[in-house]
Amino acid sequence: MNKTDLKQSIRKVIPPILWDYLLKIKDKRDKNKKKIDTEFAYFILDSAIEYSKHIGGDSGSFDRRLKNLILNADNECNSIIQDILTAFMPDYEKNLYQYYKNQEYLIFYRFLTYPFNDGMSSYFLPYEKALARFQSNDILDYGSGIPYGLIYSLLNKRDSINSVALIDLDLIHLDFAQFLIKKIAPNIKLNIYKLRDTDSFPEIEGKYNFFFGKDIFEHLTDPLKNLKKLMNYSKPEAICYFDFQDHGEKIYQHLNPNIGYLSDEMVKMGFQCPTKTSGLSEFIRNK
């Protein structure tokens, strides 16, 4: 019996009302599935290979093993390394920059797997909504990592972006982000602030009307202090997307996992009560 005949036989023994219900469930699941933008994912992978050649690395490693690991988004090795570091690195919470430095290449690898792991909506959708709000956007991405929302927007909506500032730790993934942005938008006004202290906040240039901060505030000793410093660089009219959900248990570098209270602090600064976009809190302040 072939697959078609088997499906028809199963269909005959299932009551019509149950069959309709199963189809509705399947349709709902299909709609809710996160979609991989294959073209974008391979663009990032190809750019990583180009970057490897640019810095004199062994780009042949991508053909031997690394490419398959990235395509399969296998992150188990990262969790093992984190367990080892936190178990045997004395006072690691007081030396977080060194903690990250010890695993900067694994962090870079983990970032490279993101486009192949169905997780881009939390980067793409906030940028899409924010860039549609203003004709000209000055963007500040805090704790930027590899700023996928920005990169995707520079590839597709370059004309609406006036300037960009990235703030993150001085690690290899930030060098790659700089390489990639200069490659796709060489004339963009770009300021990159590289930190060697997770709690420090730099003196930065300009004012911004679009802020993005994902997976950053739970890593800080005093999240509110840094949030206030960040918002000092806000224009009177601005839109922000921040990850303010409580993260539960204190583990690894999550110094302050419960940061939901920061939403109330944004309201005190004149922003509307937040709505949700792809798991991030959206804050809007009008003139």
Image: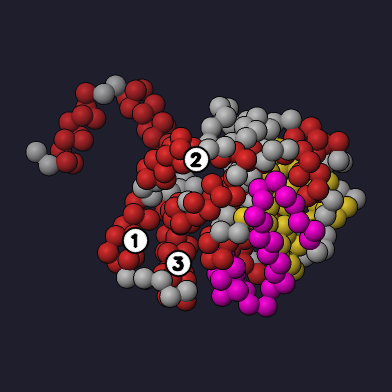
Q: Which label is found at residue 263?
A: none
In this orientation, which residue lies closer to the viewer: 16 or 67? Answer: 67
Q: Which label is found at residue 67?
A: 1
Residue that sits furthest to the front in the current view: 90
Residue contact between numbered discs 1 and 2, judged by CB atoms under 8 Å:
no
Determine the secondary structure under disc 2: loop
Q: Quadrant of residue 46?
A: bottom left
Three-letter amino acid code at the position of disc 3: Ala
Front: mark 3 or 2: 2
Residue placed under numbered mark 3 in the picture: 48
Q: Identify the magenta region.
A: 177-204
Residue 182 forms part of the magenta stretch: yes
Quarter of the figure that contains the N terminus: top left
For residue 284, side relative to residue 180 (left or right): right
Residue 111 makes an appearance in the image: no
Which of disc 2 and disc 1 is earlier in sequence?
1
